[in-house]
Amino acid sequence: MRKYVIMGVQGSGKGTQSMMLAADFDLVHIAVGDIFRWNVQHHTKLGAQVRRTMAGGELVSDDLAEGVVKDRLTAHDWNYGFIIDGFPRNQRQAEFFLESYDIDGVIHLELPDSEVRRRVMARRLCADCGMDYNLIANSPHEEGQCDACGGKLVQREDDTEQALAVRLREYHAKTNPVLDLFRRKEYVVNVDARPDRQTVQREIRAALHLPQHGS
Ligand code: ADP
Ligand code: ZN
């Protein structure tokens, strides 16, 4: 069983790297932001509760975030483990998490703030299937159209200059202390997030002493 947390600023590639790791090692990928976005898109009660906060770039309440994580992990469909992305983001969430679960490692994707803006502004999502694109490093074959399903590519509602500034500020103020806490527990491996996705993935596996080719 492998249990990981992945952390890093906006646009550092947490989602991409988590998915690559999850696919190869049969881990359940829990992306708290994706779960909230799904709820917004499907007009659920939870979606209505978080929509405005998310669009502004602020953190939603700890109760809601913890609820999502708890619900997902009590499903117990993670025989081989999980990788959690977007949680914990502050001190209280970290305490909740450490009380409830033990972890094998925290992956910290390092990206300078100057690179964040460039990446986030170039990010596009398929409105239908949610596939992620980047107009710099990973553009679709047809402009504005998803390679996988032909859906329309859109920007995330919180990928605006204004909301990004808030998100970055929240990250440095609230999430950095969590990283310090995990560092003191010697969970953290640092990986440079600037190279291409395959290189970053290789570095993550090396740092966690995982085989380069699955299982
Ligand atoms: P990013 O890390 O790029 O800001 P995410 O997709 O991980 O984006 O999260 C999007 C938004 O969802 C956050 O800005 C916040 O509003 C909300 N969110 C996600 N995870 C949490 C969390 N653990 N606690 C509070 N809010 C969260
Ligand atoms: Zn699509």
Image (cartoon, rainbow, N blue to C red):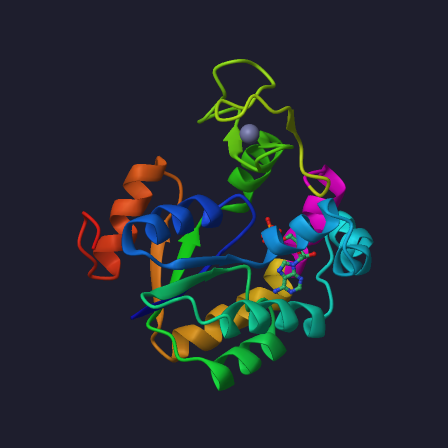
The residue positioned 59% from the left and 75% from the top of the image is 93
**Front position in the image: 44 or 48:** 44
Q: Is residue 35 above or below residue 64?
A: above
Region rendered in magenta: 159-170
**Front position in the image: 209 or 41:** 41
Q: Position of residue 17 (x, y in %)?
A: 39, 47
Q: Quadrant of residue 124?
A: top right
Q: Position of residue 137 (x, y in %)?
A: 44, 27
Ligand 1 placement by image quarter: bottom right
Q: Main secondary structure of the magenta part?
A: helix
The residue positioned 38% from the left and 75% from the top of the image is 103
Q: Is residue 23 above or below residue 140?
A: below
For residue 163: magenta? yes
Q: Is residue 76 above or below residue 95?
A: above
Residue 152 in sight from this viewpoint: yes
Question: Taking 113 as reference, is 165 left or right?
Answer: right
**Front position in the image: 166 or 96:** 96
Q: Quadrant of the C terminus?
A: bottom left
Q: Residue furthest top?
A: 142
Q: Position of residue 151 (x, y in %)?
A: 61, 25
